Image (cartoon, grey):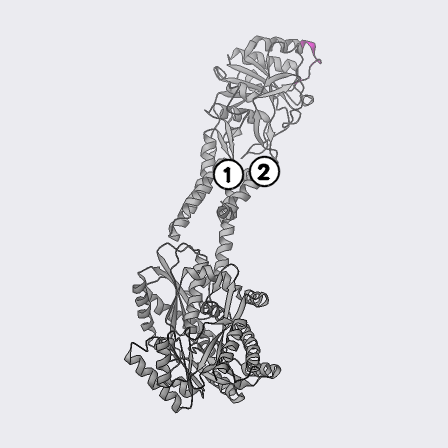
Amino acid sequence: MRQFLRSPLGIALLISLALGIPGVWLPISSFYWNKVAPIMASPASDRVIIVRMDQGADPTTADAATLLTQIRREMPRSVFFDAKVSYGVNESGDEALRHAIASFGRDFTYVVRAQKPDQFEPDGFRLPPRQIVPDSQIAISAWNTNFMYKAESAPYYVSLNGRDYPTVSTVLADRHSGAQSQYYPDFSIAPSTIPTVSGHALLRGEIAPGTFTGRSVVLTSDQGALMSYFGTNLVQPIAIDIAAAEALRKPLSMSLSFVPLLVLVGMAVFAIRVIRRQRYRVISYLALFGATLFIPMQLRAWGIVCEPDASIMFFVIYAAIRGWQKRTRRIQHTSLSGLPNLAALSSQQIEVGRDVVVVVVARYEEMMATLPRDLHGEVARQIARRLSVGSGANEIYHGESGHFAWTEEARPLEMQLNHLEGLRALFSAPLQIGEHTFDTNIHFGLDRNEGLDASTRVNSALASANEALANGRSIELFESQRLVEAPWELSLHARIEEGLRNGEIWLAFQPQWDFLEGRVSGAEALIRWNHPTRGPIAPDAFILQAERAGRIDTLTYWVLEEAISAALALNALGPRFQMSINLSAQMVDKADLVTNFAEIVRRRRIEPSLLTIEVTETSSVRNRPAACHNLTKLREMGFRLSIDDFGTGEASLAYLADLPSDELKLDRRFVSRLLDSERDRAIITSTIGLAHALRQSVVAEGIEDAATFAMLRDLGCDHAQGYYLGRPQPFAVFLSDYEQGRRRAISDV
């Protein structure tokens, strides 16, 4: 419901309803009815005939009596006396009028009009003397008017001094009650078509016999203030009474207000919105608007008043909001290339069973920098055409930083990945932009998380595409689990700071054995995190998250400080003790790395040669020359460099050739198969020989049993590390074990 109320349809309905109730839209209804009245115009029936007293400006009771007597001879059905005469001026005239009125019996109605047509207070009416109309029926003529003083409705009865008097129209139509307490004039009746004869003509015998027979005759002297109803100029009030009588003769005379039509129109608009083709939707809106104008006319012809004002304003408001939205979308949802942008895709509803695919073009901004601005759009359009051909997507969305997106039918994952790999082949041919030729390389981000909103899915695919570009992979799939971890990763820096302060993050030390000296001669400092709610967090998990979040610097420098403290304490006990720390690939190419390391060792007054820097996987290093420069500088300062996980990933012979390292660490995957695999044993043997030839020492990690330990010693390995020798431990435990080991060694000597 909240979403509906925020939609253009909901907003337009609320505004139309809220302003329609207090009558803000009434001028629109008045304008509408004035315009449609001529279209609905019809002649008055001959049931009522007006006899106009034309004896002068102030007819007498004698004049009225004469005319009533003449009318009586014509055998009318009923007579309505609507003349303004002065009583008490001519007694014989008054007596003649009383006698004439009495001759009609119950077929005579004396019309009393308010001094103002829209006045209902008792003091606004002047009732006739009882001696003139002792037994005759009295009817009241008074109208509810709108702001333009047009008659809109009248009650069936008016209460004066405790007595209810019927209104004129109800007596004319002989209908004294209805579905509502008010009735409404039929303004399709043209006042000029109401049969009217002259009093003089009647007295001179110029009226054809039978003209009044069986009809209602109104004798009027044009008394009362002029009025009007829709579609007419000012007329005598009796014309409105007659028009209302025509309405009362219909089966219904009631008002539905504006609400039913507004609800009907709102429901119709809701239904039209689902029409996909723009042409049919426009035709439907036009047809609905035409029906909105026609329905009130037809209902009025049946005696039902249904105001169109709120519905008309609903169309105006709805069209204004939709127009503003479309203009906003054209501005906000269109890129400089003229293609719809990612905001346009994010605002749509993505159907179930469709994947969101985002492509990022490598070095896109460099391409743009080499081109004049007027060709930038052409680059995007050419890329979009290739993607459209390859994917079959009708619409390709363009982000300004070289991102292109679309949705397509979800396939089995392996088939989808093969499809995207095939799509890359379309970019094997270079782009030709004017006189410029560009090779292009694209990377994909794929989101398959159905049920999430479009914005989340687009952002997920966008993040995956950027990650694929950063890691040099063709395709990156955004797994739903990453959405769960997103709040954790986005607040990781604050959590790391808190963990360092309260001791959740701590440093463990795993011993390294020196085969030549037969003792523990070093240790590797390993970071650990015991979170109060998540429990122990695997180092690979939070270190990877820290790298993604760009927060690895804080951890690295904290580890260096803690490792130095441990190294100083251990070296103070006697024999040389080497401390190893890990350096993330995210840091090795940073400009301030060497300066920061130098400042820390200077402040802590430790020999850099007591510290070994283990360089981990470097495939994600963006600036390899800078990384090699930094590591070379650190080695020149005295730090020992170790190539971690040698033989896997980037830790290859090429990397060994680039860096003047001091140590190789054999990956645990080779060490664990040493006893069972001749091939792995040969690899380890040759690696040890290669390292020694390059004047480097070898550390084997992952040793878990005595047999492996003994074989590595026999093969000439320099150092050993693994659970067989000791698990990573807090420094206090490690220090205690180290001291006990030294004491046993001394006692053995």
> Element at badge 2?
loop
Note whether 406 is above or below 264 in the view shown. Answer: below
Between residues 573 and 554, which one lies in front from this camera angle? 573
* Residue 569 covered by magenta stretch: no
Q: Horizontal and vertical percent for residue 712?
A: 36, 82
Q: Residue at x 71, y 14 (%)?
A: 89
| Callouts 1 and 2 close, C-beta under 8 Å | no
Q: Is residue 716 above or below residue 228?
A: below
Instruction: Identify the disc placed on residue 308.
Output: 1
**The quadrant where residue 499 appears:** bottom right
Give the extent of the magenta segment. Answer: 85-92
Which residue is pictured at 48% across the width and 59% down the height? Answer: 329
Secondary element type, mark 1: loop
- Give x and y (percent) for residue 738: 51, 77
Q: Is residue 86 magenta?
A: yes
Left or right side of 650 for 743: right
Question: In the rendered view, does 92 fall on the left or right side of 363?
Answer: right
Earlier sequence position, callout 1 versus callout 2: 2
Q: Is residue 667 visible?
A: yes
In the displayed structure, 548 sits above or below 625; it is: above
The residue singled out by tag 2 in the image is: 23
Q: Residue at x 61, y 8 (%)?
A: 99
| Residue at far right of view | 89
Q: Amino acid at mark 2?
A: Gly
Circle 1 crowding by C-alpha within 10 Å: few under 14, some 14–19, many from 20: many
Assign the magenta stretch its main secondary structure. Answer: loop
Q: CA distance from mark 1 to mark 2?
A: 12 Å
